Image (cartoon, rainbow, N blue to C red):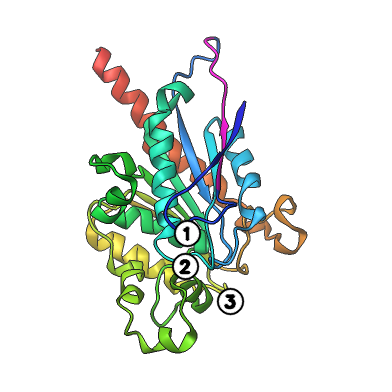
Amino acid sequence: MKNEVFSIKVGGSLPQTRLTTYIQEYYKEIDIEDRPLILICPGGAYAYTSPREGEALAFQFLSMGYHAAVLNYSCAPAVYPTALTELAYSIKLIREHAREWHVNPGQIIVLGCSAGGHLAASMGVFWEESFLAEALGITDRELLRPDGLILCYPVITSGEFAHKGSIQNLLGIGEEEREAGENPLIAKVSLENQVSSKTPPTFIWATFTDGSVPVENSLMFVGALRRAGVPTEFHMYPCGGHGLSLATRLTGSRAVQEEVSSWITLAHTWIESRYVKTDKKDSADSQS
C-alpha cells in the first residue's frame, strides 16, 4: 500500500489541513487494473475532524478492495467555502493522479459523516458552480465532480431541524444571526434546496433516535433527490445515537450499536452493483 500525506492549501486553509491517501499496490497477478476510491470527510460539527470517522473507515474500504483517502479539512475559525474548496482540490488531485495510482477516474466516491456529510453533500450539489473552479484556477469543472456520495447521519439543513453548532461554525456566525436568517449563506448551505439532476447517486443512512442531528436532515435530502430523479439508497435504523461511525468497538466502546453496523456492508453492495459490476459489464460489452 502507498500511504502519502498531502498538505492542502487553498484560500483560508488552516496549517493542519491534509489529505491522507491509502492506495492499493497494483499487481499483474491480481488482475485489477483500476479501483474505486472512497474519499472520507470525518465529522465534528465543523469544529474539528473526528479521528473516529477517518482512518478506521478507510481501512474497512481498503479491505473491500478499494483505494481510500481521508481529508482533514479546515474547521472553525475557517469559514465557508474553505472546506468545500479543499474537498474540490482533493478530488482534482486524485483525478490528476488517477493513472499513476490506478484509480478509476469515474469512480471517486465522497463519504461524509455528520458535518462531514454536509461537506460531502455540498460537493454533490455545488461541484459545477463557478466559484469552485475559479478558486482552483481551472476551466474543466468535470475534474471536481464526485461520482457518488455516501452520507452517514449527515447534517443537511439550516432550517428547523438544523444542527445549530455545525451551521454556526461553518459560517462563522452566532446563534442570533443564524436565527435571524438574513445572511444569504444560511439559505445557500441548506442543501435540501440545492439538489439537482446533476447531484451524483447517493447512499445515505441515519438512525431514527439520533438526538443530535435529527433524521429529518436525511429525509429532506432523500426527498429532494427523489424529486430530482437522482438514484438513491436510504436506510433508517430504528435505534442508535449520533456519531456511530462503524458502530463497533473499533470506533469506540460508547458507540457500539450492533444492528447498525450492517451499513458498511450495504454500502459495499451499493458500490459493487452501481460502479464495479457496471464497469465490468461495460468493458465486456465493448469487447463483444
Q: Amino acid at mark 1?
A: Gly
Q: Is residue 239 above or below residue 74?
A: below
Q: Are marks 3 and 1 in contact (CB under 8 Å)?
A: no
- Tell me the magenta residue range: 18-28
Does residue 152 appear to the left or right of 104 in the view shown? Answer: right
Which mark's residue is nearer the viewer, 2 or 3? 2
Instruction: Pick the residue in front: 199 or 165.
Output: 165
Q: Please state the horizontal and vertical placement of residue 65, each as a whole percent of the image.
A: 55, 30
Q: Amino acid at mark 3?
A: Gly
Residue 153 visible to the viewer: no
**Image point 63% across, 52% down: which residue?**
246
Cα gap from disc 2 to disc 3, whole angstroms: 12 Å
Disc tally is 3
Q: Is residue 33 above or below residue 71?
A: above
Q: Please state the horizontal and vertical placement of residue 240, each as a whole percent of the image.
A: 62, 67
Mark 3 or mark 1, which has the lower sequence index? 1
